[in-house]
Image (spheres, rainbow, N blue to C red):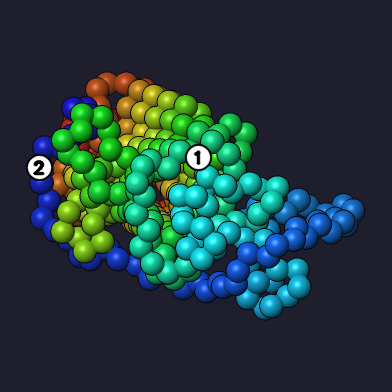
Amino acid sequence: RDRMKAAFSLPGVAKTAMSIQLNAGGRRRTSVIPEPEKPQNQPPVSKEQEIQDAMRRLMNGNDNAPVVITVPIDKPLEDAVRDFNKEKYDYILVRPGVYRCNSVLEVSKELHIVGEVGARIVGSWVFKANDTRSTIHNVALQFEADTKQTDYQRLVHVTSGELHITDSALLCPLGYCLWTASRSSVSTKGCIFAGSDDGSVQAAAGVVAMDFSRCTLTDSRMENLEESCVFADNDAEAKLTNCTLQCADIGVMLTDRARAVMSKCTMRVFRRGCFGQLRSSETELSMKDCTTHGEMWGLGEKPA
């Protein structure tokens, strides 16, 4: 933590709450709908597309409505996560409300969660399933870090497998919003990474990519952070497209053979600089059509 800790504090910034427009409804059906035969010579359908198609069927009242676990009607959130089985259910549907978890949600299987407008889950997550692709869509995820703890306080920690998060907020006052490691792969689209939703408390960092992991961030925003918006270390890679990084000590921090690829991003309002490198180590930075404001490099070191 000492390597990443920022030297200065930043006053509260603009409010970072977000409203995500997506409506879904309906209760879990009691029968499993068999999969239709796929036409020949057609490209495979992604899991995200399957879920979107299932939601449209649900909202249109189609007989082929998806099989879902509805929280809290069918089960409490933690029970729904525990009992979810991709062979039996399409996804977990979270109705509007605040759901507080009593313990860390450890996910060692494929999991798909869709939230209605106003769905907020308070608690930390660990995704550790090999060879799976989980998804979270349209949910405000929140975790209030305990500063008395000596270990890193993370909202979402991905140690293996793939995770795709869309149209969601990752809010982690005093902690780390997203942390990837051990060759895991995470992608986000249309997400916010920040501290408290009223802007009064900073997060430690937005995205931390470690140990050969891969992060792909698209149309997302990182702000109100004590350390950096993105920190990549130990052969990790971060790809950012059309993202906004602002209000932190440093925008993107690189060290130990890490790589950052940025396209059409905006960077502004940093205490020390848009970019930083710890120690004199081999790193790589690629930028295309990006807009930066203020000091370009902090800490003195730059990629070779």
For residue 272, the mark is: none
Residue 246 appears left or right of 115: left
The residue under the point 32% across, 27% down is: 255
For residue 107, the mark is: 1
Total numbered circles: 2
Quadrant where the N terminus sits is top left
Q: Quadrant of residue 74?
A: bottom right
Q: Secondary structure at mark 1?
A: strand
Residue 164 image point, x, y percent: 53, 49
The residue under the point 35% across, 62% down is: 98
* N-terminal label among 1 and 2: 2
> Mark 1 is on which residue type?
Val
The residue under the point 50% across, 33% down is: 128
Q: Is residue 66 visible?
A: no
Residue 104 image point, x, y percent: 38, 40
Q: Quadrant of residue 2?
A: top left
- Residue 299 vertical placement versus 71 (above, below): above
Q: Secondary structure at mark 2?
A: loop
Contact flag, marks 1 and 2 (Cβ < 8 Å): no
The residue under the point 21% across, 64% down is: 198
In 3D space, how far apart are the residues under numbered discs 1 and 2 (Cα atoms)?
36 Å
Quadrant where the C terminus sits is top left
Q: Is residue 265 visible?
A: yes
Nearer to the camera, 201 or 227: 201
Nearer to the camera, 140 or 80: 80
Residue 147 image point, x, y percent: 17, 39
Give the class, few, some or many, for how many residues have Cα within 10 Å of label 2's Cα (few <14, many ≥20).
Answer: few
Residue 189 image point, x, y percent: 48, 56
- Residue 175 vertical placement versus 234 (above, below): below
> Mark 2 is on which residue type?
Phe
For residue 8, the mark is: 2
